[in-house]
């Protein structure tokens, strides 16, 4: 049974030197897989602390900004979106060899069953910094609340849960993590590229936004499909004994992806299908400006 370690939860701990050492080894020799696993395991409570601070910070800023003019922040936003677009695209490119390579060699089952170097070398390094990057992505929400854009439950909920899942799952690294990380990199490469182009005022057809949201939904459909295969093999067929699996991580991933799928489908329907979707948010923003 999981028990909260209140000492770790109430004591700030971040080992900057160890993280620097992991990056130094990755650049000069090879990615230190075991050190990276241990680092995230040791800093899970740090991720919890950051999530708590993030939650109160964004709603605190939202409250403070209620009767204030929104910040412009256009240039920082341009730079931020460009950085994440390049980062996500690089992650998708560098992890493609492992993702498609194992499918080619060992099939779909092998891709969610075996590690086969998933957490080693270049691929392991990109999985590691993917988990760390979920801390940086909290910045997305800071831009939203400072610019007084609509803050949806989906937005902050998925930022928090993905961070906590990343720090929890990487130390045990079940094979199905390959799908979640790679698909997220691919979707984010398109999403942040779209955000960047929009932020520099490049006109983009409306169907592109619909396509990106559809891509996010497909991402979770595929991830859930993989998890269903894992569950059927493990619990029904009893044939998953030869695979790398962590049961708590499996159930957390299943809950996470299912809630994401429901929330993203709801967002798609509200934004693009039901009347008053994105127009509703525009009206809210207009009312807020008029009331100032």
Image (cartoon, rainbow, N blue to C red):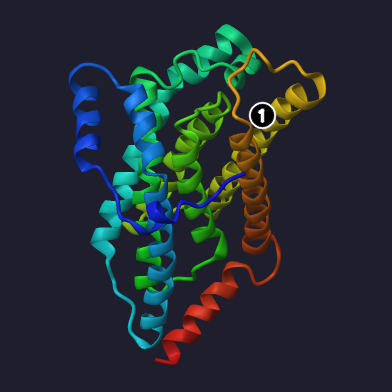
Q: Is residue 237 above or below residue 284?
A: above
Percent across and percent down for residue 275 are 69, 70
Q: Is residue 175 above or below residue 216?
A: above
Considering the image in quadrants, where does the N terminus appear? top right
Q: Is residue 137 above or below residue 224?
A: below
Q: Residue at x 46, y 51 (%)?
A: 5
Percent across and percent down for residue 70 are 34, 78
User: Which residue bears the numbered disc 1?
Assistant: 226
Q: Which quadrant holds residue 87?
A: top left
- How dense is the environment of label 1, judged by Cα within 10 Å: few (below 14), some, or many (20 and up)? many
**Residue lying at the far top of the rendered structure:** 105
Q: Residue at x 20, y 30 (%)?
A: 21
Q: Residue at x 26, y 52 (%)?
A: 79
Residue toward you, 216 or 274:
216
Residue toward you, 99 or 47:
47
Q: Which quadrant holds residue 257?
A: top right
**In the figure, is residue 270 to the left or right of 25?**
right
Residue 41 visible = yes
């Amino acid at each position: 049974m999981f028990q909260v370690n209140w000492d770790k939860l109430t004591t700030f701990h971040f080992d900057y030197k160890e993280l620097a050492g992991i990056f130094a080894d990755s650049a000069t020799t090879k990615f230190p897989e075991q050190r990276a696993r241990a680092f995230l395991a040791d800093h899970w409570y740090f991720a919890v602390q950051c999530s708590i601070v993030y939650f109160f910070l964004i709603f605190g800023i939202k409250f403070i900004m209620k009767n204030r003019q929104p910040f412009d922040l256009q240039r920082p936003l341009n730079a931020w979106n460009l950085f994440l677009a390049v980062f996500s695209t690089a992650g998708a490119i560098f992890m493609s060899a492992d993702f498609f390579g194992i499918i080619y060699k060992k099939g779909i089952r092998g891709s969610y069953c075996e590690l086969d170097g998933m957490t080693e070398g270049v691929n392991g390094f990109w999985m590691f910094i993917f988990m760390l990057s979920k801390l940086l992505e909290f910045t997305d929400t800071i831009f939203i609340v400072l610019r007084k854009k609509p803050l949806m439950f989906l937005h902050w909920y998925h930022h928090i849960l993905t961070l906590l899942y990343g720090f929890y799952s990487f130390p045990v690294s079940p094979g199905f993590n390959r799908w979640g990380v790679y698909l997220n990199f691919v979707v984010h490469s398109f999403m942040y590229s779209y955000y960047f182009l929009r932020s520099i005022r490049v006109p983009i057809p409306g169907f592109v936004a619909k396509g990106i949201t559809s891509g996010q939904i497909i991402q979770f459909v595929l991830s859930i499909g993989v998890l269903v295969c894992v569950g059927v093999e493990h619990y029904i067929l009893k044939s998953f004994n030869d695979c790398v699996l962590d049961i708590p991580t499996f159930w957390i991933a299943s809950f996470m992806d299912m809630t994401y799928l429901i929330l993203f489908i709801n967002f798609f329907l509200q934004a693009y299908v039901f009347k008053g979707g994105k127009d509703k948010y525009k009206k809210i923003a207009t009312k807020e400006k008029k009331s100032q």
